[in-house]
Image (cartoon, helix red, strand yellow):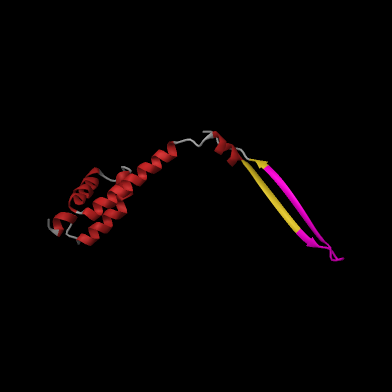
Amino acid sequence: MSDDDLTGRGGSVEQERRDLRFGLEEALDGELPEEVVQRMQRHTDDCPECAEEWEQVRRMKELVRRSCADRAPSELRERITVQCRTVSVTRTETDGSTVRVTRTETVRRGFPAP
């Protein structure tokens, strides 16, 4: 395969690889024209480095999609909605004695509906 066959526009192989890397996510998300995605896939047939990167990005995007679809367990959601804050202040009085004041506050935060 010649450089012109690979790039489809007479550019260098290295330039084409850079272009393909920048468009991987868009291609996998269906945001590029089909002809561009097909050209990228043809390139990965002959370029193991790009094929590996394509597959890694595809797997990562699939994992993120699956993870975002899962709902957190109710116990975890409850722990997240309650926030505890403890503030401790230590001060020295004029007579040299030390006073430590600790205040704990629990705030219940609203959690967005699913």
Horizontal side, residue 68 vs residue 83: left or right: left
Q: Residue furthest front?
A: 97
User: Quick check: can you spot residue 79?
Assistant: yes
Residue at x-position 71% and y-position 45%: 105
Q: How many marks?
A: 0
Look at the picture and state if 16 lies above or below 27: below
Which residue appears at 78% of the width and 61% of the height?
91
User: Where are the magenta residues, as a range?
Assistant: 90-106
43 vs 92, nearest the viewer: 92
Residue 92 rendering spot, x and y as whole percentages: 80, 63
Looking at the image, which residue is at 56% across and 36% down?
75
Q: Is residue 15 magenta?
A: no
Q: Position of residue 20 (x, y in %)?
A: 26, 54
Q: Nearer the viewer, residue 12 or 96?
A: 96
The kind of secondary structure the magenta stretch mainly shows is: strand
Q: Residue furthest left?
A: 1
Q: Taking the image as drawn, is residue 31 in sight? A: no
Q: Quadrant of the N terminus?
A: bottom left
Please tell me whether residue 93 belongs to the stretch shown in magenta: yes
